[in-house]
Image: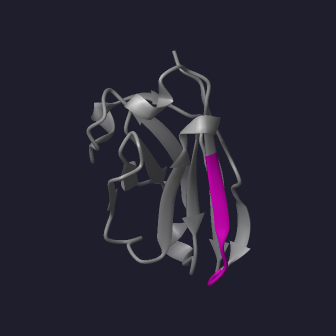
């Protein structure tokens, strides 16, 4: 098990910004693709964005493209999600996940480790 710990969630007004962090404690962090997912009450877990091991490739889900930015600092074993222009529909629990290899995946089943989640609430 590779603990992943998210932080940075909170309550923000629509149009505001938040920055989420995900710190991993395992080895060889840079060899694994990482991803952010979110889940709203009563809905399925949704892919938000993925990033390759060295950070050279990213893939954004359409709902967040142009507003969210993913990045990672492999020296710190940490991944980030900068969320701007937040909307009420962005409300949910945000999870970071580590892939099984360096290939970015859109499906949750492709990820091997998950954080406990951090709540993001956007008030309109």
x, y percentage for residue 60? 34, 63
x, y percentage for residue 89? 49, 72
The total number of labels drawn is 0
Q: Which residue is drawn at 34% across and 56% down?
A: 58
- Return the residue nearer the eye: 25 or 124: 25
Q: Which residue is drawn at 32% across and 26% down?
A: 100
What is the quadrant of the C terminus in the image? Answer: bottom right
- Return the residue nearer the eye: 115 or 67: 67
Task: Indicate whether 24 appears above or below 78.
Answer: above
Residue extent of the magenta highlight = 14-21
- Return the residue nearer the eye: 123 or 65: 65
x, y percentage for residue 90? 52, 68
Colouring scheme, one of rainbow, by chain, secondary structure, one colour: one colour
Instruction: Determine if the magenta segment contains residue 23.
Output: no
Residue lying at the far top in this picture: please name it.
Answer: 1
- Answer with left or right where residue 75 lies relative to residue 109: right
x, y percentage for residue 104? 29, 44
Instruction: Quadrant for residue 43, please give it.
Output: bottom left
Task: Indicate whether 1 appears above or below 25.
Answer: above
Task: Indicate whether 15 appears above or below 89.
Answer: below
Q: Can residue 24 be seen in this view?
A: yes
Instruction: Quadrant for residue 15, please give it.
Output: bottom right
Q: Residue at x 38, y 49 (%)?
A: 51
Task: Indicate whether 68 appears above or below 6.
Answer: below
- Answer with left or right where residue 37 lies relative to residue 80: left
Instruction: Quadrant for residue 74, please give it.
Output: top right
Instruction: Determine if the magenta segment contains residue 18.
Output: yes
């Amino acid at each position: 098990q590779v603990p992943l710990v998210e932080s940075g969630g909170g309550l923000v007004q629509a149009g505001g910004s938040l920055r989420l962090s995900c710190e991993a404690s395992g080895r060889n962090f840079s060899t694994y693709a990482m991803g952010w997912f979110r889940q709203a009450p009563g809905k399925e877990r949704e892919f938000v964005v993925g990033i390759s091991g060295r950070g050279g490739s990213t893939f954004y889900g359409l709902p967040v493209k142009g507003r969210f930015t993913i990045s990672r600092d492999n020296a710190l074993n940490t991944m980030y999600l900068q969320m701007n222009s937040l909307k009420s529909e962005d409300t949910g629990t945000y999870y970071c996940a580590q892939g099984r290899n360096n290939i970015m995946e859109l499906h949750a089943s492709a990820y091997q480790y998950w954080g406990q989640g951090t709540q993001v609430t956007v008030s309109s």
